[in-house]
Amino acid sequence: MALPARAGLFDDDEARKRVDALRIDHEARLEKLEASARGQIELANQIESLKAEIAKLRGQLEVMTNDLDQAQKRQRDFYVDLDTRLRKIESSAQTADAAPAPAAADPANETRDYEAALNLLKVGKTKEAANGFVAFIRAYPKSSFLPSAHFWAASALYQGRNVAEAAKLFNKVVENWPDDARAPDALLGLSNSQLELGDKRGAKASLEKILSKYPSSPAAQSAKQRLGRK
């Protein structure tokens, strides 16, 4: 009678061991699944965080780009308005001091044509402005506006991506009117053009020329920054 009791006890122990083994295996699998799920959740959170950071950086970049565009526009408008006022003063002074010349061009037409081209540039019509300044240069070869006409023609061509022609006109300002107030800015424009044309050595030489010939000009500050000097 004792043998069947032992057999039953043995069977119960084996069953418990198997149940325990299955439970342990099940718990181990659950832990792995939970660890995997936690890892996926953490990865998803990291991805969302990166997406938010990228969106934030894009927003900041858009704001900075817009601010830069507005600053460049304000600077261009400032130069255009300043140029108009200066040239009106110069024209008035020269008209008052100059002796009458029978073959001279009509000052009224000269001023009108110059301001017409300048106004085209002011509203962003770069192609029309460039054509207007080039026509002015041909029509009034002895005009006191020639340095400015060449400078603004070059600026309009540069903005219109005709960089090679812009470089030629910037260079004419530097060579023909080195004492003009626009000569330093013309050198800066020439450097920009040379850089876009792949002439890094020439671009650097133009910046160095600004520092040597026009060290007190606003263009010299830009030249120092580009050359990495203090």
Image (cartoon, helix red, strand yellow):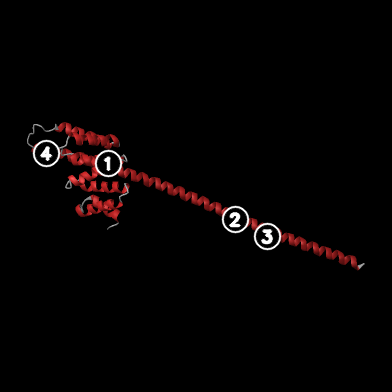
Question: Label 3 neighbourhood size at 10 Å, few (<14), some (14-19), many (20+)?
Answer: few
> Which quadrant of the figure has residue 103?
top left
Question: Tag 4: residue type?
Answer: Gln
Give the alpha-carbon distance from disc 1 to disc 4, as whole Å.
31 Å
- What secondary structure is found at the residue carrying circle 2? helix
Tag 3's secondary structure?
A: helix
**Badge 1 vs badge 2, beta-carbon distance below 8 Å:** no
Residue furthest to the bottom in view is: 2
> Tag 2 or tag 4, which sits nearer the N-term?
2
Q: Residue at coordinates 19% horizontally, 42% vertically from top-left?
A: 147
- Estimate the spatial distance between the alpha carbons at disc 1 and disc 3, rounded to whole Å: 76 Å
Residue 28: mark? 3
As measured in the structure, the alpha-carbon distance from the residue carrying label 3 to the one carrying label 4 is 97 Å
Q: Is residue 116 visible?
A: yes
Spatial CA distance of label 4 from label 2 is 83 Å
Mark 1 or 3, which is nearer the eye? 1
Q: Residues within 10 Å of mark 2 (few under 14, many from 20)?
A: few
Across and down, in percent, residue 10 comes to: 83, 65
Contact flag, marks 1 and 3 (Cβ < 8 Å): no
Q: Which residue is mark 2?
A: 38
Residue highlighted by disc 1: 165
The percent coordinates of residue 109 (x first, y second) are 17, 31
* Quarter of the figure with residue 162: top left
Of labels 1 and 2, earlier in sequence is 2
Which sits in the foreground, 154 or 34?
154
